[in-house]
Image (cartoon, rainbow, N blue to C red):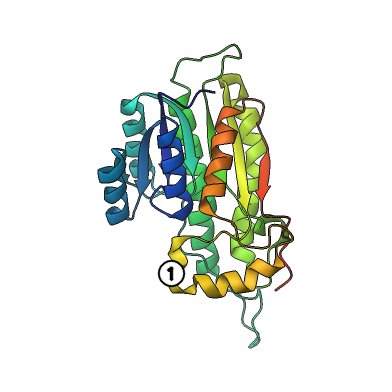
Amino acid sequence: MRIEGSAALVVGGAGGLGEATVRRLHAAGARVVVADLADDKGKALQAELGVRYVPADAADEDSVLAAVEEAERAGEFRIAVDCHGGPASGGRLVGKDGSPLALAGFRTTVDVYLTGVFNVLRLAAAAIARTAPHGADGGRGVVVTTSSIAAYEGQTGQLPYAAAKGGVTAMTLVAARDLSPLGIRVVSVAPGTVLTPAYGKAAEQLEAHWGPQVPHPRRMGRPEEYAALVQHLCENDYLNGEVVRLDGALRFPAR
């Protein structure tokens, strides 16, 4: 699929993974729409790159619809990337005091990290389906979601997040099968430990902790590596229904 000239929506586009993806797709010639709740960062990207910024909550239907409509106005809408973040609860299923893990926190985490992905996936796909097919294979576009290696090896105290990301992983093949008649591919990236600007002063400590645990290269991942993979997933028409681990062969230990 050709990125140049296509409209692309990046949900969570003002965050670490998202900003790198916005820059990568913009450099490749896409007409990028940034959807996020971080107004300052979103507007800064708009001013610097000339991309379009739309405030949007991934789990909110109306705001995602507004972002999708902006992408449709930008050009032939063929690319949607969802790498949004948000609050995530944690804790052991039964605490040391014998109390069960809070239901409210589980629901919030699933709402952000699973329901939000489903919401973006369904609304973006419906809009991409309205775009005329192109190329010899009659494809219309691609939706890239973001899972996590926690979907496979969730750590102690990470049950809500692991469950949500496991749901994203499980949706990938089914969504690809659902959307194949429309010429829309669905792929997901499962990052390991990626060092983003959001960690701030804690970055050095995180690198010191996680870097030595990664087999090779012996460091945390970089947002630019996520973005490079997203570009390849967009351009390689035979990648469909797959979750690609991006983790340097890291497997999370139990804790």
Residue at 63% across, 57% down: 192
Picture residue at 34% right of the left edge, 42% below the top: 62
Viewer-closest of 16 and 95: 16
Q: Classify residue 38 as left or right of residue 120.
A: left
Image coordinates for residue 244, horizontal then vertical, percent: 67, 44
Count of number-bearing discs:
1
Q: Residue at x 49, y 60 (%)?
A: 196
- Say which quadrant the N terminus sits in: top right
| Residue 5 pos. (x, y %) | 40, 23
Residue 160: quarter of image = bottom right
Foreground: 97 or 210? 210
Q: Residues within 10 Å of mark 1 (few under 14, many from 20)?
A: few
Quadrant of the image containing the C terminus: bottom right
Question: Three-letter amino acid code at disc 1?
Answer: Gly
79 sits left or right of 92 in the view = left
Q: Is residue 91 above or below residue 211?
A: below
Q: Is residue 176 above or below residue 171?
A: above
Q: Is residue 36 above or below residue 141?
A: below
Residue 165 left/right relative to 204: right
The relative height of residue 165 versus residue 178 in the rendered view (above or below) is below
Find disc 1 in the rendering and name its residue: 200
Rendered location of residue 9, percent (x, y): 41, 37
Q: Position of residue 114 (x, y in %)?
A: 54, 51
Element under disc 1? helix
